[in-house]
Image: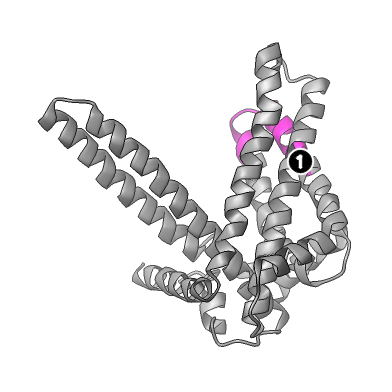
Amino acid sequence: MFQKINNSWELVKTSARVLGKDKELIIFPIISGIALFLVSLTFMIPMFMTGFLESLSESFEIIGIVVLFLFYVVQYTVMFFFNTALVGAAMIRLNGGDPTVGDGFRIAFSRFSTIIGYALIAATVGVLLKTISEKSKGLGRAIISMIGLAWNIATFLVVPVLAVEKVGPFDAVKRSVALLKKTWGEQIVGNLGLGAFFGLVTFLVILVFVGAAVGLTIWLESALPAIIIGIALVLILVGINLVQSTLNGVYTAAVYQYATGAQRTSEFAPELVEGAFRAQ
C-alpha cells in the first residue's frame, strides 16, 4: 500500500518536473476542453430544442445510433488531435529538445488524417459497446464494462504511436497492443499512479471545501459563503483536471519511450514507469 502511494507521488513529481520546463503544454488540455464543450453544445442544444433528446431516452433507434456515432467521431477527433499535440511536444522534451506549442500542433496536423481514422475506429467500438450495454442487464453490462476496460488498456499507447510513427489507424492499435504485450502488458492491474494521486487530491479538496461551505453557512446563516466556495471549488477542480491531463500526456510519452526502448532522458527511471503497471 505504502509502495503504491510512494510510486504515485514519484510519478507526479517526475511528470511535474517535465511540465515545469514546458509550462505551455497545459495549453493543449485547455483548448481541448473548450473545444469538447463547444462540440457537446453543438449536438445537445439542437436535440434538446427539437425534443429529439427525449425521444432517444424512450427508444434507442437507428437514428439515435447514427447521431451518437457522429458525436463520438467529432469528440474523439478533437480529443485525439490535442492529445497527439501534447504527447508529441512532450516527446520532444523527453528527447532533449525544447518544444513549443507550435511544434505540438505541427505534429498533430501532420497526423490529422490518421487521427480521424482512429476516431472512426474508437467511435465504432464506443457505439457498439453502448448499444449492447443498453440491451443488456446485470452480468451482461458488467461484461461489456470489462470489454471497454480491455479496449482502453489495449489502446493506451495509440496516441504516442500516432505522434511518432507514420502508421495507419489500424496499425496504430496493433502497435499499441504489441508494445504492451512486449513489455509489461501482462502485469497491468489498473495501478495508474497519476490517476490515484489526483483522485485522492480531488477527494480531499471536495471534502475541505464542502466542509467549509457547510460550516460558514451555518455560522453566518447565509447561503452566500456556500455559493462563493462552490464557484471556487469548481474552478479549482477544473485546474486540477487540466494539470492531471497535461501530466498524463507527459507520462504517456515516457511510457512509450520505455516500451520502445527509445529512452533518451533520465527524467523517468525505467523502474518507475514499469512499476506503475505492476502489482506491488
Residue 249 on the magenta segment: no
- Residue at far left of view: 219
**Is residue 53 among the parts visible in the rendering?**
no
Q: Nearer the viewer, residue 161 or 25?
A: 25
- The residue under the point 82% across, 48% down is 121
**Part of the protein shown in magenta:** 125-143
**How are the residues colored?**
one colour
Point out the image quarter for the C terminus.
bottom left
Q: Position of residue 125 (x, y in %)?
A: 77, 43
Which image quadrant: the N terminus? bottom left
Q: Quarter-wise, where is residue 50 in the image?
A: top right
Q: Residue at x 42, y 53 (%)?
A: 199
- Is 230 rendered above or below residue 105? above
Horizontal and vertical percent position of residue 148? 67, 46
Q: Residue at x 65, y 71 (%)?
A: 100
- Residue at 89% x, 61% y is 168
Instruction: Kindly state the secondary structure of the residue where label 1 is placed.
Output: helix
Does residue 134 belong to the magenta stretch? Answer: yes
Nearer to me, 16 or 168: 16
User: Amino acid type of disc 1?
Assistant: Val
Q: Is residue 99 visible?
A: yes
Tag 1 residue: 74
